[in-house]
Amino acid sequence: MVLESWPPSATWAVVALTTLYIAARHLASRKQDPREPPVVPSTIPYIGHLLGMALYGGRYLKEIGIRHRETTPIFTLPVPNSRIYIVTDPSLAAAVQRASKVLSFTPIIPEVTERILGLDKATVEIARKNLDPAPGDEKGFLFDIQQMVYDWLGPGDYLGVLTAAAANQLKAEVADYIGALRAGKVDATSVDLLEWVRHCVTVATAQYLYGSENPIAKDPTLEKAFWDFDHGLGMLLMNIVPSITASSAYSGRERLVAALADYLEAGKYKTASKIVQERVAIALQHGWTLRATARSELSFLFAGIVNLTTSTFWILLQVFADPELLQAVRSEIEAVLTSEDGDSAQTLALEDLKNKCPVLHAVYRECLRLNSDNNSVRVVKEDTLLSDRWFLAKDCVVQIAGGVIHADSSIWGSDVDTFDPKRFLAEVKGKERQVHPAAFRAFGGGKTLCPGRHFAMNEILSFVALVVLQFEITGADGGRIEVPRKNDAVLPVHILEPMVPAIVSMHPREGWDGGRDLRLVLKRS
Ligand code: HEM
């Protein structure tokens, strides 16, 4: 009888597959604990969310987040053998940040860096040691290096030293470019603004961090290698035969690592910035080889370049796209320029950009809000009840969805998708804060808050001021600049890039300085 009904009819096959599908979907969307955050099932059980993230990047998560944020501040995405808990509410984000003992980023750092930087097994073992030491315990490499970077880049004398070095290096890059424009060596009417900012920031950062012997100064083709590496990070992270599936990123990384390794082995780091010298010293104390240290230094170069580049690009584009805004920002900057009688230079005190240019500062904040879809990631080290309410299972992942929070109209207003620096003006002018402090997520938050944020602001404001003072920028045809949409269909590893290149016309602003030089100092004397 059984054989008589074989093979099964198409109807039976459909019924069986449908039943299987419903059962799988039901199983995948079951809560592990009644207090677990609401589960959002995927169309394809178990792997659907992973596929969605792989295909649509950060936009996938953002769309789900925006759909569910009004009903719950946190939800669960089931994935094979684990769960991803997505937090979309600033108060709950702050609670995640406070629970840093049980919700921690550090356990994932060794594996992420192994994949992205291509660390060898022995070095990963060193990186795994004493990640979160209790007081009195031996401290591991990651703990020591993070502590040092947070201390040195925090407010203090060294921050001033590095800011002055970076600003003067950028000034030199801009001066070189003005020279090339005046000599007719470059086409002023067709400039890819992001490419231009990338070039200035990459060359300047390599120089102020690694000195004049830095690998990019010695071999300018490494600049392209750097951006190839950056654009393939998502694939490197997946780590499926990266030399084939992420070939440009892989070969860019390996070329940079080889050049940095030669630089370190030749002792040239002794002419680098003090912070780089200290980083190398810490790596050596913990038993890293110089060749492995080259990989860690690539990560520092990356941290110093990528977010700074795209943030500066958006700020310049938005300022020059709006004549009134340009006028406001330019007047503020010109108002803080000083010069003594008979002085052959005007002085720009970098501190004044931060404290006396509220519109510039507000544009900076608004561009970061609009273009940062950053996710802060934590691993659940033990079963946890977040805010006494939400059950989070051990070994699962929590993500604070910056892209969702930055696009939340209940926080930022109904014009949330529009560029409007005014929303930050009151805050910058020191009036009462209108939004939860954890709602601004461009620098992450809690224990992983970006250590470079003070420095980044100083450097970006200086670079923008240099360009606003010295250039006229219009659309390529001489008309108004069109601001392209951001490309959010990528893994949001840094401030998002535009969907299409912004091609502009860039001319030196003649006569603005009365023939005087521009001197950059930290503070007015
Ligand atoms: C606008 C510019 C910048 C933005 C938006 C930015 C943003 C971020 C973000 C979102 C993180 C991860 C935080 C998290 O996971 O919660 C981070 C980490 C980091 N940033 Fe920045 N960053 C900027 C500039 C810089 C600069 C200029 C430097 C250094 C010169 C720097 C150094 C670092 C370092 C070293 C880390 C890793 C910290 C760790 O080890 O935990 N950043 N940054």
Image (tube, grey):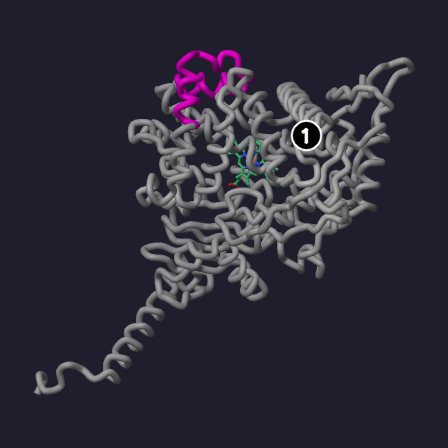
Q: Nearer the viewer, residue 203 or 475?
A: 475
Q: Nearer the viewer, residue 99 or 425?
A: 425
Magenta residues span: 256-284
Quadrant location of the N terminus in the rendered image:
bottom left
Q: Horizontal and vertical percent for residue 150?
A: 55, 28
Q: Nearer the viewer, residue 487 or 16?
A: 487
Q: Residue at x 49, y 23 (%)?
A: 219
**Label 1 amino acid?**
Asn
Q: Residue furthest right?
A: 341
Quadrant location of the C terminus in the rendered image:
top right
Q: Horizontal and vertical percent for residue 234?
A: 43, 45
Q: Is residue 346 magenta?
A: no
Horizontally, is 134 left or right of 486 in the view? left
Report whether residue 272 is seen: yes
Q: Horizontal and vertical percent for residue 140?
A: 39, 26
Tag 1's secondary structure? helix
Q: Residues within 10 Å of mark 1 (few under 14, many from 20)?
A: many
Q: Which residue is mark 1?
A: 458
Q: Is residue 258 magenta?
A: yes
Horizontally, is 434 left or right of 297 in the view? right
Q: Residue at x 73, y 27 (%)?
A: 182
